[in-house]
Image (cartoon, grey):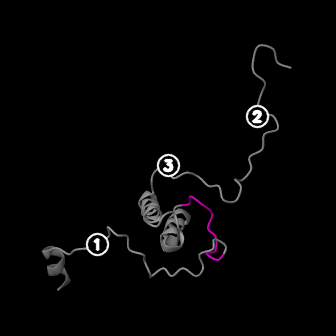
Amino acid sequence: MSFGRPPSINVGFKVTAPDRGSFPLDHYGECKEKMQLYMSCLKENGSTSSPCRNLSKDYLDCRMNKGLMERDEWKNLGLANVDDKSKTPLKDDKPPQTTGENQSTQN
């Protein structure tokens, strides 16, 4: 027993991996843009996630690529049948506009 100081909390403490489904927060905002697109899609669709599955896949892919979550197969995440090519456009999304500079460099 130690009088006059707090007991040592490090005795017997073991580091364990986080539970499946819990992962580090994105403190540096590495995937913030993809998260915001997904959240906007949810808001536009009354929190129905089905129309936003491709954005969810993009967000999780970003997290896996940045080491913010463990890489896993899409079928385990319930996103195996989501096509990467078909993007659900948001109401505010507009096709990218090209400037005169970009057109001249493409020739």
User: In the rendered structure, are the residues bearing label 2 and label 1 in contact, judged by CB atoms less than 8 Å apart?
Assistant: no
- Identify the mark nearer the N-term, 1 or 3: 3
Across and down, in percent, residue 42 comes to 48, 64
* Residue highlighted by disc 2: 10
Q: Is residue 20 magenta?
A: no
User: Which type of secondary structure does the marked residue at label 1 adopt?
Assistant: loop
Q: Residue at x 56, y 60 (%)?
A: 67
Q: Quadrant for the C terminus, please.
A: bottom left
Distance between the alpha carbons at the discs numbered 2 and 1: 55 Å
**Are circles 2 and 3 on residues that touch, CB within 8 Å?**
no
The residue at the far bottom in this view is 107
What residue occupies the far front of the structure in this picture? 46
Does 33 sit above or below residue 6? Answer: below
- Is 71 part of what is drawn in magenta? yes
How far apart marks 1 and 3 lie (CA) works out to 29 Å
Residue 75 spot, x, y in % from top left:
65, 77
Which region is colored magenta? Answer: 67-75
Q: Secondary structure at mark 3?
A: loop
Q: Nearer the viewer, mark 1 or mark 3?
A: 1
Q: Which residue is mark 1?
A: 94
Q: Quadrant of the N terminus?
A: top right
